[in-house]
Image (cartoon, rainbow, N blue to C red):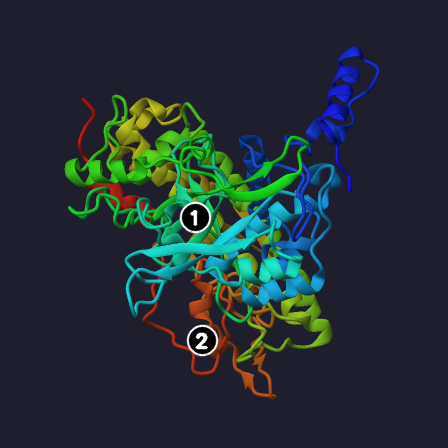
Amino acid sequence: MQFISSSTRAITALLLLTGLLVATPLLAQDPNPPSIRGGGAWPIRRQWTPAETKHYARWVENLFDKKTTGTVEQRTAKLEYLLKDPEMNLLQDPAFLGEGGNPQMPAGLMRSMHHLMDCGKFTAFIPAYYAYRRALPWMTATVSTGQRGVDVRIADFNIPYGGTSSHTSPSLSHFFNNAVGHFISGNFRINLNGKNAELSDTLPVALNRDQLLPGCMNYLDGHCLVLAKVTEYGELYFLNCSTTTSRDIFTYNGMNVVGGATPRGSDPDDEWAGCYQGLRVLRYPIAETDSRGNVTRVRRRTDQEMVEFGFSTEQYDLTREMYDNHFIEEGDLRPSSIHDLIRLRMKTLDRIAPAPFIRQYCDELLQAYIERERFIQDAWKDVLRNGPIVYPEDHEKDNIFQATGRWETWSSPSSDVDRRNKYFYLADWMEYAIRMFEMKPDFIDMTGLESYGIRSQADLAAAMIAEKNKHFEKLSLDYVNSKGQKVTLTLKQVEERLYDLSFDPNHPPELRWGAPFDSDEFAGAPSRPTPLPGGHKMPMDEAFKLQAFYRSLCQRETSTSYLRGMFTAGYPIRDKLDAQVGKWSYATDALL
């Protein structure tokens, strides 16, 4: 067993101070070097510390970053790929893993974990895997309902008991199959003052940037998510795993999944009843040791011991304040929602400047669509050279977003989702600026917007829409049509066609860029059918019509894809930017 004793560490420190030993990058980078020795399902060499939780946060955040900005394989990665790819999993880097880290999980166990995954088990697996690789103790509880005949996933409260500890488990597979396999969303439904509450897996966390870190959890009445990113604007982003057969891992952006916290004192007989929804910190276990650093047992940290890791009940107090007053007192500011309070506390920027941000973002969005044109031309060349590409209809394992062969290579439903999300991020960012303007007007740097005479949220909304449209009308790209001629589209025209950009590689470039069938732009384009499994061929205009739903999505589907008989109406379509941000036109109160 690799282990650095306390005496060896003291000598090393002395040599470093006297200049007789040069620190290696590995020692310099590890925020929490080995300090104890223990066994069980895996060797234990470290304790959880606040510095370790920041290391853990960096690991989780990198998973999110690769999931959102990485290669196609990384953006669509399931559990096994996520753990094996060294760019996604920083624990594959010996320097990040640190001295005394444990080896990669066996492939067979990874696959068995993949088949277990759902949103709850994903929140159990992520910290357990990290603890295993970094040689930290870990444990999860088993829960039973406090209400006879009620499913633990929907019970008013549950009671934790026993559970699985890495220190007492006889093997790695035994621990993971029990600790993850027995974990369900009901594990979160533990009242703070309930029976055995000290055995709970999580606690409510303080709303500040030092302690609400990636790796924390969010629980919303049966739905469990891993906090994975906190932006400089104070926005929270999450990772989640689906319950479908494919067990896809998703990213969630924005605050739409944060909410539902029960106000403290909602039950007059029990002030903490139901206070388990919301943002949570893991109840990190501690390994008790003898005088030589040998682990004698592993236990949960107490509530008091968890304060330095972020334990706080303020979410429920603030929700009560919002419930009673319809605002929250935060210094001299009055946020009108928990979401606005979180943004205010979690942001790192002192000011934001909408005009230069919009200009730069429009340039980035244009580049994303210029890259799409390069891809479309390569796809069209492949179809002309090698023939049509079969649409993966009604496949149990494949769908249009993730398939095998030429469809996976040359279709664009996944990358089109990414580009729509990039477009809508601009709308969400504008709304962020508008909300912050209400709370703290001087947070908005008006450089470049002076001519708009902004005095209200409505004014700011109108000004930002105008700036965006100015750039959208000026910026343009060229695409090559099926006849080899260049066609120019402004970014404004691309926006107008946002839900008409075909992802089907069998369609000519004109249709890939959304040219209307009755337009001069489309005139002369070849009509190529889309082949389906079994030999059926769908005419181009009919295929385009039946693919409309998939062109409207802002996230990848994990279920079976269809074409024949697909619905063409009755599904929600997100408003484009001008309509989304334009709804702030009612906010007409002028600044005093």
Badge 1: residue crowd in 10 Å (few <14, some 14–19, many ≥20):
many
Residue 161 screen position, x and y as percent: 43, 55
| Residue in front for this viewpoint, 213 or 505 | 213
Question: Whole-Å distance between the Cαs marked 1 and 2?
Answer: 52 Å
Q: Which residue lies under the disc numbered 2?
A: 546
Q: Residue at x 68, y 32 (%)?
A: 292
> Which x, y percent locates residue 124?
51, 54
Residue placed farthest to the top in the image? 18
Q: Quadrant for the C terminus, please.
A: top left
**Amino acid found under the numbered disc labelled 2:** Leu
- Which quadrant of the structure image shows residue 96? top right
Corner quadrant of residue 571: bottom left
Does residue 377 appear in this view?
Answer: yes
The residue tagged with tag 2: helix, strand or loop? helix
**Amino acid type, callout 1:** Leu
Q: Are marks 1 and 2 in contact (CB under 8 Å)?
A: no
Tell me: 165 left or right of 95: left
Say if 398 sits above or below 452 in the image: below
Farthest residue to the right: give it.
20
Please provide percent x and percent y for residue 20.
84, 15
Foreground: disc 1 or disc 2: 1
Residue at 45% x, 39% y: name it.
471
**Residue 369 appears in the rendering:** no
Q: Nearer the viewer, residue 154 or 193?
A: 193
Q: Where 297 falls versus 118 (above or below)?
A: above
The quadrant of the rendering that contains the N terminus is: top right
Give the mark, 1 or 2, whose residue is nearer the N terminus. Answer: 1
Q: Position of residue 306 (x, y in %)?
A: 44, 35
| Residue named by callout 1 | 199
Disc on res. 445? none
